[in-house]
Image (spheres, rainbow, N blue to C red):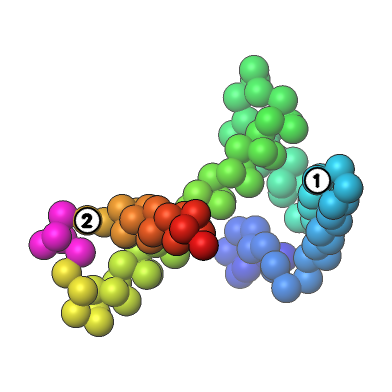
Amino acid sequence: MSDAEGNLRLDFDTWKVQVKENQRRNVLKLYVKLNKVESIAFKNFMETVKPDNVSENEFMKAIFSMGVESMEGQLIRAVEEKLSASGLDLNGSGAGLVEIIEEDNEDTQNTEAEV
């Protein structure tokens, strides 16, 4: 899909995505089916950006990892904003969201051990 200026705009609503899980082998497979224009655009992107010493497989894993990390960061910031808006002072205590989550996990583990 292109806009009026000729720039490629990916239409995620038309993507066909399948997630297949094999619980016996603990394997998860992701399939993304792109249309012809999107496929050409992605191949051009990969040829331009991918370092020569990186395989296409490694490059795809890196793109996926970076997307997950970016989304995780956005979620953490959103939760911190909600907690801050609710009156919880994360900065004053010196504890960030990660420390709070770790403390909660330790409390849960201790509780589970006591039961």
Main secondary structure of the magenta stretch: helix
- 94 lies left or right of 99: left
| Vertical side of 79 occupied by 95: above or below | above
Q: Which mark is residue 95?
A: 2
Secondary structure beneath label 2: loop
Task: Examine the rendering and report whether any part of residue 6 can be seen.
Answer: no
Residue span colored magenta: 90-94
Q: Is residue 92 magenta?
A: yes
Q: Which residue is mark 1?
A: 26
Quarter that holds the N terminus: bottom right
From the viewer's perspective, is 8 left or right of 66? Answer: right
Q: Position of residue 92 (x, y in %)?
A: 11, 62
Amino acid, disc 1: Asn
Q: Where does the image place residue 69, in percent across and percent down from the top left?
A: 50, 49
* Residue displayed at 71% across by 46% down: 42
Q: Amino acid at mark 2?
A: Ala
| Residue 17 in view (yes/no) | yes
